[in-house]
């Protein structure tokens, strides 16, 4: 197998940690020797062993301590070179006798980026970087954005009719999208660390904003539920967000400075990724402020006429375009997912 093929398996390991590792990134690793996969691992969460350590542990358990000597380590992110809540992985690879390290993405922190290369090469270890970089960076984009800007990766999620409305005519029920789309939203929630909503949405819909599929909750807590309102005293005390088992994961924040609000979530809660589940006014405010990185839109095959729009309020200073768009059908609904960029 090629380096890229081995890295593809390491990426599969890394994907197991998406939504579970904040404030750390999801990382996967393999230990390979003479074309044989000896061990694999992924980072399970902050304070727990890093992916390289997990991979070496499984290799030693299966093949003995000497098996790792002379092996190649494949890692989706440059091995850490400093001691934090866990030992530096670079030192661990050297001590284990690894002879070659292949990694996909360089650490985005300028204080650490490239440091592992020097340490490993000084120890006589061959280093190859940039293998399957684009694919691995896809799941690392929230961590990279936090490291570079101090802001989390923000996703706007919306289910709407073909004419851009988020409510149906009175008397028709609340759901626009079908069951398959709503199940996919559960998976989306499991990818993020926090969900932003508005006080208006809480008052109108009494949402829970939880992950309700037990298998998606394994290894993680419920996402933070962040209610953005200037009138916290008018929030309904009977709302599930204040009464359910995850009530300790509910925050009430002022939306006066949206950038500061997001920075606080990174600094205080260790958040890497956020999803907006709110009405048209709050969603539009986040988009107008240029704080949204990605959109996930579920189009239901229905026309709703003069009901509540998906985006409301002032016009945008510049239109936004979805790039790298992926489309997928969920029942009768069509999902569009893509990055948001300014129209040029």
Image (cartoon, rainbow, N blue to C red):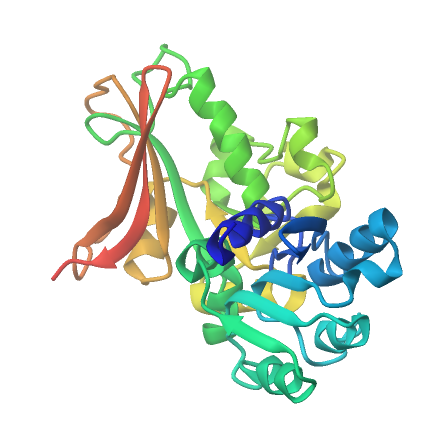
Residue with the most extreme front position: 34
Residue at the image point whose x is 42% and y is 19% from the top: 174
Q: Which residue extends farthest top?
A: 171
- Quarter of the image holding residue 213? top right
- Which residue is more in the foreground, 304 or 85? 85
User: Compared with residue 275, is residue 50 higher up or lower down, i.e. above or below?
Assistant: below
Query: Is 20 left or right of 264, judged from the image as shown?
Result: right
Farthest-out residue, left: 344
Where 291 sits versus 12, above or below? below
Give the quarter of the figure containing the C terminus.
bottom left
Q: In which quarter of the image is residue 329?
A: top left
The residue positioned 62% from the left and 84% from the top of the image is 121
Q: In which quarter of the image is residue 247?
A: top right
The answer to whether residue 204 is above or below residue 102 is above
Q: Nearer the viewer, residue 102 or 248?
A: 102
Q: Nearer the viewer, residue 250 or 46?
A: 46
Q: Please indicate whether residue 138 sits to the left or right of residue 24 in the image.
A: left
Task: Give the residue at x 42% y 49%.
Answer: 155
Residue 281 spot, x, y in % from top left: 33, 46
Coordinates of residue 294 in the picture (x, y in percent): 36, 50
């Amino acid at each position: 197998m090629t380096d890229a093929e081995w890295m593809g398996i390491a990426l599969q390991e890394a994907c197991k940690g998406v939504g579970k590792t904040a404030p750390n990134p999801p990382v996967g690793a393999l230990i390979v020797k003479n074309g044989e996969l000896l061990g694999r691992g992924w980072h399970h969460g902050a304070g727990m062993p890093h992916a390289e350590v997990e991979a070496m542990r499984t290799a030693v358990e299966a093949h003995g301590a000497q098996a790792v000597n002379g092996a190649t380590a494949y890692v989706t992110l440059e091995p850490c070179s400093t001691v934090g809540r866990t030992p530096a992985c670079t030192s661990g690879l050297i001590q284990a006798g690894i002879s070659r390290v292949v990694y996909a993405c360089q650490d985005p922190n300028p204080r650490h980026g490239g440091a592992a290369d020097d340490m490993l090469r000084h120890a006589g270890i061959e280093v190859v970087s940039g293998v399957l970089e684009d694919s691995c960076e896809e799941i690392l984009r929230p961590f990279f954005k936090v490291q570079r800007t101090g802001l989390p990766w923000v996703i706007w999620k919306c289910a709407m009719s073909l004419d851009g409305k988020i409510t149906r005519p009175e008397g028709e029920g609340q759901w626009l999208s079908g069951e398959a789309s709503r199940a996919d939203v559960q998976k989306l929630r499991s990818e993020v660390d926090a969900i932003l909503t508005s006080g208006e949405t809480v008052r109108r819909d009494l949402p829970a904003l939880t992950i309700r599929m037990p298998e998606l909750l394994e290894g993680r807590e419920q996402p933070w539920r962040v209610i953005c309102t200037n009138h916290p005293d008018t929030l309904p005390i009977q709302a599930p967000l204040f009464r359910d088992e995850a009530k300790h994961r509910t925050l009430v924040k002022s939306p006066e400075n949206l950038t500061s609000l997001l920075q606080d979530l990174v600094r205080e809660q260790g958040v890497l990724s956020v999803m907006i589940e709110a009405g048209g006014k709050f969603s539009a405010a986040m988009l107008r402020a240029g704080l949204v990185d990605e959109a996930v839109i579920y189009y239901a095959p229905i026309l709703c006429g003069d009901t509540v729009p998906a985006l409301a309020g002032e016009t945008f200073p510049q239109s936004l375009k979805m790039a790298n768009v992926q489309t997928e059908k969920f029942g009768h609904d069509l999902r569009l997912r893509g990055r948001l960029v300014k129209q040029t």
